[in-house]
Amino acid sequence: MLYYNQLKAFKLRASITAFMCLLIVNLCLSQDSEPSPWSRFGLGLNVPSYSLPQQLMGGVSAPIMIGNVINPEQPASAAGCTTTLFQSSVYGSRNGMNEGDSSTTAITGNMGAFNLVVKKPGGKNAVMFGMHPYSSKGYNLSRTLTDDVVGDIIERYQGSGGTAKSYIGFAHAFRGRKWVKAGKTDSVMIASSSLYLGGQVNYLFGEVMQQSRLDIQDITYLDYRASTSMRHRSLGGLFGIQALKVLGSKYDDEKNFIRSTTLYLGGTYATTNTLLTDYEKIVETVQLLSSVETPIDTTSYINILNKEGQIPSKWTAGVGIAFESKSGSRLLLSADMMQEDWTSVADNIDDLMEGNSEWAKANRLSLGMSFKPGSSGNRIYKAGFSMEDYPVSYEGYQLSGWKVAGGLTFPLEGSRSNSSLHIGVEFGQRSLKDVDGIVLDNTLQESIFNFHLGVSLAPFFKNLWLTPKLYD
């Protein structure tokens, strides 16, 4: 008969129930991610699509191979998962904005990606699918001007909505083995190298809405309102490759492991995709009548279906090195970089920009580390740093930012599986900078603090999913 600790099982069920309730409440209450005036331009601010374990390492994703987490940005990594996995997260965000003597703070929350990998334990093939946010628009701006003729004027700009991506992918693993010396006279066979290949088909969809208003405080004048709706969709592909090589390993005379050093390499390439947009814009004169805003006249109406644009190709490349010892400790150091040149397709999507903004080349450099002390059980401590140039240039200066992150991954107690809980924080800043990286005076500067909570769920270790039974 199989016995188990009922208190631990109750705590596990309670933790999962609380997490799912948090997901539902967060879905009902949250509409925008990192609300920012900069989301006014383009498709909005890009939302990181990598999962929480990678985010806590500064966004390093291309070379990372971790068997009990999902890496949606690297389709090849699914082949390295140990078994079937489900993964998701939620986060809360505090965004402090300062410009000159003015300042404000926005507090929001949102859900991270939903990811699922289906894989037989010990198998070489894996299927992955899921959905994650791609971009978000969330801003509410206003300023007051004075005109010599009409008096005080209030300009208002509002935006909401965003886009998301769903995907399905396949990955396959090639593994190599070799004999290494164990002590002076013996040897042992180890898994010395692996090559993972993977691909995804993804579908981008969503709607973003913008509204600009000109409110003249003198009621003898009509006000102006322009409302824009853009419904986007795009079909694309993402391909990835990962490789690992054991650079050195040592065993004693009794074939006990002593230490090893392993090199990880990885890269991804996202294809250039056609972006289809249903574009609708209406410009009206309005007047406040009995506290109700009433349209008086339509000065312009534009409705374009299936307007074609493009989303540029994107590539990432990274490297990592891991050191393991017989005590169970493991140190992983990693780095990767990303580039996405939006200027190459700017002519096709220039109407998504407004005012003095234009498309720019997006870049990101990420550094990350994880450390598992030999005495900590299965707890893994993570930290990372990233610098990013966003695909937005305003009055000739590119929007840039940086983030530092840290967190902890530990197993769900009593689950009797590879399920784990992830918790961490991020802090960063975003602003316009000159070519020397100096923040421009009297421009909008943002300070961002995020708190993350995520979970990776695996089946009970005796539930051998996708494994044929030996006996009927």
Image (cartoon, rainbow, N blue to C red):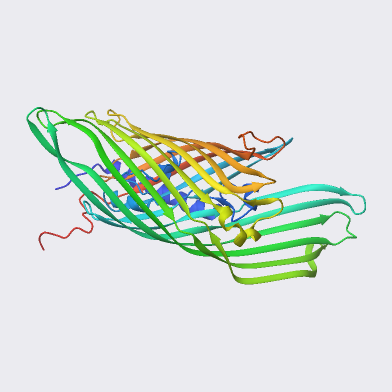
Q: Residue 71's spot in the image, x, y percent?
A: 38, 49
- Horizontal side of residue 278 vs 419, given as left or right: right
**Residue closer to the observer: 154 or 14:** 154
Extreme residue in the front direction: 344
- Horizontal side of residue 81 vs 189, given as left or right: right
**Residue closer to the observer: 153 or 73:** 73
Q: Residue 230's spot in the image, x, y percent?
A: 61, 64
Considering only vertical position in the picture, is 377 above or below 122? above
- Horizontal side of residue 405 vs 244, given as left or right: right
**Do we see residue 59 in this rendering?**
yes
Q: Residue 242's spot in the image, x, y percent?
A: 33, 48
Extreme residue in the left direction: 185
| Quadrant of the frame with the C terminus | bottom left
- Horizontal side of residue 403 vs 352, given as left or right: left
Residue at the spot 60% in from the left edge and 57% down from the top edge: 346
Occupied quadrant, residue 190:
top left
Considering only vertical position in the picture, is 80 above or below 288? above
Q: Residue 397's spot in the image, x, y percent?
A: 66, 43
**Do we see residue 31 in this rendering?**
no
Residue at the spot 42% in from the left edge and 48% down from the top edge: 19
